[in-house]
Amino acid sequence: MILSELLQLPVLDAVGTRIGVVTDVRFALDHDSGDAHMLGVLIGRRSRATFLGYERKTETAPALIARFLRWRARGSFLVLLDDVRSIEPDGVRLRTDYRRYSPELP
Amino acid sequence: MSTIAPRARGRRAALALVLTGVCLGTAGCSQAYSASGRLAQAASDASAQTQTGALTLRLSATHRLPSPATDTALSDAIDKLGQDDSSLTSADVSGGLETARTRILSKVRTGEDLLARARHLTEAGAGQATTDALVRQLQVTAKQLAALQKQLQGSG
Amino acid sequence: MKAVLGLALGVLTAIGGFVDIGDLVTSSVVGSRFGLTLAWVIIIGVVGICLFAQMSGRVAAISGRATFEIIRERLGARVGFANLVASFLINLMTLTAEVGGIALSLQLATSLQPTLWIPVAAIAVWLVIWRVKFSILENVTGLLGLALIVFAVAVFLLHPDWQSLGGQLLLQSPSQGSETPATYWYFAIALFGSAMTPYEVFFFSSGAVEEHWTRKDLGQSRVNVLVGFPLGALLSIAISVTAAIVLLPHQIQVTSLSQVLLPVAQAGGTIAAIVALLGFVAATFGAALETTLSSGYSLAQYFGWSWGKFRRPAKAARFHLTMIICLVVGAGVLLTGVDPVQITEYSVVFSAIALPLTYLPILIVANDRDYMGDKVNGRVTNFFGLVFLVIIVIASVAAIPLMIISAAGS
């Protein structure tokens, strides 16, 4: 599976209720090897509501744009890959006890 | 949560529809799209082209414009008058506007003839008096075309 | 001494390179129809382009990334692609208008049909891009473009009624005018689009990467932009003024490039007309080079191809191929007989429509510490940056409705 297939997929919880759309995928860099591995998916209410970089808490300027983009992406959350039960062509299914993490970056 | 997106989309589509309606409505009432508006437009453009011809001829006669530029300016004006001619000929007008169309068209053709003569004059070279007379004729035709345009706009 | 010369050269080329077919035609059309009542738009437009070029030049110098690399990185592949398609098509339209402008200028100089000049112009543009060094092509066309100063001289030679011109600046419409508000605002957007053309920014930021700008060059670039562009805009205003003095009283609405020349001939005779023609050729040729390069830059930067004139053509094959195809398409469109002046009139409006697509990403990245370190926008720049974002978005949104209502300004 490639990233562009994952983006925009609907996300369902364990009982099959739609809880949002995959808006972004988060990767982490391994310090020693320099390899990137997938940490989890960002789930938003609308497919086009992305942060455009304002998920980093330190980026606040220009204030109006930052506030607007954060407002558009409100309600977004991060779900770790461990909490994803399956990724299928028609949607992403989560485990029963998945946890919602803040999408913000330091 | 899943119901939000379709509703927003519906609202957006409705807004776009209303905006398009408003635009087309305004456009429909505006001069630019009515038959008399189009005739007025052709008259005003033809007037501008005829004036351009007069100005070009005057500049050329006083040795202020290089001859390739004179030639180009006159042929541009002739081309544009030709376009006005054909758009007037093909315009779909009814009743009262028919007389207006005929009058504008005859003046446009006068302008075309005058400009063709102007082009000939600048190539062959002509006396001051001939040139001055032609400039005046072009200006008179341009004023008549402008007057016809005003009449059309006045009548709506 | 060398530094002073470099600074002067940069400023002079920025002045001479400011005007292109869009400015020539739109300024003259507006002057002949509205007098100086729209001159305020040129002033707003030049403040906008200064701000935009200054930000994108700074981003390019500090991060080493040009406009479309940033758009792709920051907006992601999908939004970035929509952005690329719109910007690329409008740039192609502008390129077509510029090549047509070269042909029309050469027709004015020789009275040979433009259809003969179109292939010549396209091939000449391609040869120069292929063979000539970046700094030379930029400087030569920029310096020759200074010939357009003849329009500013013409204003004085025409001994205008300064009081009436001043009144028009303050929006007292000239007595001959009979234009509707929709037409007025449509041309306001066209004039804004001609001053703030997106290709200028692609070219400016990619040029910064071509010339390997670094932090050290920021001062020079700021002077080029902040001095050169406003003086270039004065030329644009001068073109408008000559049309307002000579053509407006005769109700000659400009529809062809030859009419743009007439006021200069009236003011200064044959010599002035020849100098102006030289300026036309330089301005359109320079802009044709810039738009052609911009077509290659935008596509190559988005898709990650190697690009740049500093690389040998074989090392940046797709970049060069893109430019050749764009020139062929532009010349082909022109050979169908469409009027380059009309393409120009539409291209400036569409430029205004597409402007937010490139402006917003640059504004955002110019604030990003990960890219910019301590060279992020200051408070004042951000204030004006946001004010212009609002202006740009309003112009972009209003353009199409106004185009419909005013029948494209007819």
Image: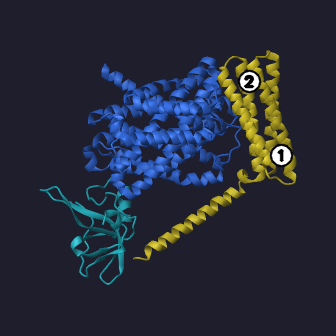
Chain colours: A cyan, B yellow, C blue
Q: Amino acid at mark 2?
A: Leu
User: In what quadrant of the picture does the C terminus of chain C appear?
Assistant: top right
Mark 1 lies on a secondary structure that is helix
Toward which corner of the image does residue C113 lie, by quadrant? top right
Mark 2 lies on a secondary structure that is helix
Against C382, is B62 above or below?
A: above
Q: Nearer the viewer, residue C16 or B74?
A: B74
Q: Is residue B82 in sight in this rendering?
A: yes
Q: Nearer the viewer, residue C100 or C150?
A: C100
User: In what quadrant of the picture does the N terminus of chain C appear?
Assistant: top left
Chain of residue at mark 2? B
Location of mark 2 (residue): B57
Toward which corner of the image does residue A26 lie, by quadrant? bottom left
- Residue B85 point in image, percent of width and height: 78, 41
Dot 1 or dot 2, earlier in sequence: 2
Location of mark 1 (residue): B101
Mark 2 neighbour class, 10 Å CA radius: few under 14, some 14 to 19, many 20 or more = many
- Residue C16 point in image, percent of width and height: 47, 28
- Same chain for mark 1 and mark 2? The answer is yes
Q: Nearer the viewer, residue C16 or C109?
A: C109
Q: Amino acid at mark 1?
A: Arg
Q: CA distance from mark 1 to mark 2?
A: 28 Å
